[in-house]
Image (spheres, helix red, strand yellow):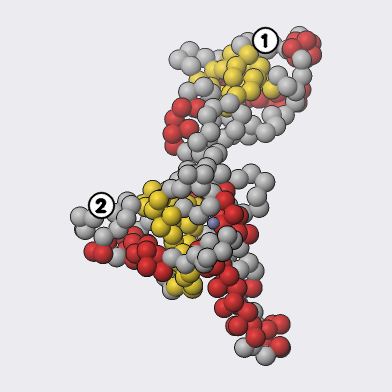
């Protein structure tokens, strides 16, 4: 074990930081023995729950079960009472339930107290950085200090390109680095005979320019550079210093709804040479 203080902290997405919002449902209370009877009544006579599949139908209390009948947005109370009139069920409380699924442990621990919900964290939330990866990340950040923005293959840790900013308002380091990857790709394609180009395109580079690559930078990229990173489909971004009005910390460009690609972002402390 190393005694390093090198820290890698994943920056949460706006969805992961979202506070609880709710919608309302009609409920009834029953004894546990009546559960299957009530559920078949609900399936037959009441509107399906829509958009709140993460919400559990039944909440246990010490003495009885509280069961969701349907959403208040689906039918009026008057209609519901008319449907319940000839049954053995009665309308109970109108309750709040979380209207979106929790995606972090923190959201889950708070939201389940409002009403029980299922918790299935997205895959990228569960990925842990291994000790071997920490060394690789530390090494590439140290390289970034010398060479500007660095792009690497996450599987082989091979450096694909690195670039510093040029004296031009649009040629920031990240833009220049993407440009270098484009040049490499062009040169590679030119070196292939046409028949090979058509049929033997390796799948990892046949799609988007920087698909799945790790990007390392000392300073957080600006919004323009982040947009270019979205378009070129990078996998992960690591940086040290947040910038005011930065593409990630201010604009959340790594996980914006409406953009068709999201990537993971980690803010790191400055590594020591011994961390790499
Ligand atoms: Zn920029």
Label 2 Cα crowd, 10 Å radius (few <14 / some 14-19 / many 20+): few
**Residue in the foreground of this view, choosing between 84 and 247:** 247
Q: Quadrant of the C terminus?
A: bottom left
Ligand 1, by image quadrant, is: bottom right
- In the image, 96: left or right of 160? right
Q: Quadrant of the N terminus?
A: bottom left
Residue 131 sits above or below residue 267 on the image = below
**Residue in the foreground of this view, choosing between 79 and 136:** 136
* Extreme-bottom residue of the structure: 193
Percent position of residue 232, x then y? 61, 63
Percent position of residue 26, x then y? 66, 17
**Residue in the foreground of this view, choosing between 269 and 201:** 269
* Extreme-front residue of the structure: 167
Name the residue located 64 percent from the left edge and 73 percent from the top edge. 206
Mark in front: 2 vs 1: 2
Percent position of residue 54, x then y? 59, 34
Quarter location, residue 105: top left
Name the residue located 50 percent from the left edge and 27 percent from the top edge. 111
Name the residue located 60 percent from the left edge and 16 percent from the top edge. 95
Whether label 2 lies within 8 Å of ligand 1 gets the answer: no
**Residue in the foreground of this view, choosing between 231 and 67:** 231
What residue does disc 2 label?
5
Q: CA distance from mark 2 to mark 1?
A: 60 Å
What residue does disc 1 label?
90
Percent position of residue 118, x then y? 53, 35
Residue 153 in sight from this viewpoint: no
Q: Secondary structure under badge 1?
A: loop
């Amino acid at each position: 074990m190393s005694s390093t203080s090198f820290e890698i902290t994943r920056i949460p997405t706006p969805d992961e930081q979202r506070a609880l919002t709710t919608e309302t449902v009609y409920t009834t209370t029953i004894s546990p023995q009546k559960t299957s009877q009530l559920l078949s009544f609900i399936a037959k006579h009441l509107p399906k729950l829509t958009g709140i599949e993460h919400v559990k139908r039944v909440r246990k209390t010490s003495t009885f079960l509280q069961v969701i009948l349907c959403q208040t947005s689906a039918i009026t109370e008057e209609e519901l009472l008319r449907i319940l009139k000839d049954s053995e069920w009665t309308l109970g409380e109108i309750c709040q339930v979380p209207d979106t699924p929790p995606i972090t442990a923190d959201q889950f621990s708070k939201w389940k107290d409002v009403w029980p919900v299922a918790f299935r964290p997205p895959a990228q939330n569960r990925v842990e950085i291994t000790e071997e990866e920490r060394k690789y990340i530390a090494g590439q950040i140290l390289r970034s200090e010398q060479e500007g923005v660095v792009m690497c293959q996450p599987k082989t840790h091979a450096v694909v390109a690195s670039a510093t900013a040029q004296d031009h308002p649009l040629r920031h380091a990240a833009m220049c680095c993407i440009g270098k990857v484009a040049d490499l790709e062009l040169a590679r394609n030119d070196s292939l005979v046409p028949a090979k180009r058509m049929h033997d395109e390796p799948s990892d580079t046949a799609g988007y320019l920087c698909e799945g690559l790790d990007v390392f930078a000392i300073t957080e990229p600006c919004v323009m550079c982040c947009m270019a990173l979205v378009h070129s489909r990078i996998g992960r971004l690591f940086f040290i210093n947040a910038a005011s009005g930065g593409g990630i910390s201010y604009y959340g460009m790594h996980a914006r709804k409406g953009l068709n690609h999201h990537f993971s972002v980690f803010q790191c402390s400055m590594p020591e040479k011994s961390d790499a």
